[in-house]
Image (cartoon, rainbow, N blue to C red):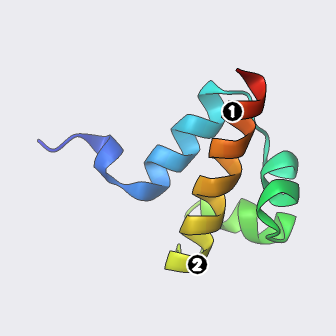
Amino acid sequence: MANKLTNPLTTIRVAAEVHGIDSVELAARSGLHPVQISRILNGHCRLTDNAKSRLVDAIGAAIKEAA
């Protein structure tokens, strides 16, 4: 069985949870609408390459600031 963290959406969701980044902060940092963040995280819409890149950058920035 493959590691579930190979799924980019799962990786983003887990990283946000582990580092205490809620959907509102994720939306603010990524520039994506909060409703879109909710839909992405709940699997109700497709994770585009653009959204994935923006979410990864937002989580990375939040983690660096917390360190």
Badge 2 or badge 1: first in the primary sequence: 2
Query: Total of numbered circles in the picture?
Result: 2
Measuring from the top left, give residue 36's x and y in whole percent: 75, 71
On residue 17, the disc is none
Q: Quadrant of residue 17?
A: top right
Is 24 placed left or right of 37 in the picture?
right
Marks 2 and 1 sit apart, C-alpha to C-alpha, by 21 Å
Disc 2: which residue: 50
* Horizontal relation, residue 12 to residue 29: left or right: left
**Element assignment for label 1:** helix
Q: Quadrant of residue 22?
A: top right
* Quadrant assignment for the C terminus: top right
- Please, which residue is most extreme toward the top here? 67
Front tag of 2 and 1: 1
Q: Residue at x 30, y 43 (%)?
A: 4
Q: Is residue 26 visible?
A: yes
Disc number placed over residue 64 in the picture, else none: 1
The amino acid beneath tag 1 is Lys
Q: Does any portion of residue 48 appear in the rendered image? A: no
Residue shown at 65% from the left, 65% from the top: 54
Q: Amino acid at mark 2?
A: Asn
Mark 2 residue element: helix
Instruction: Choose between 24 and 42: the one closer to the eye.
Output: 24
The location of residue 3, given as percent across then percent down, is 22, 40
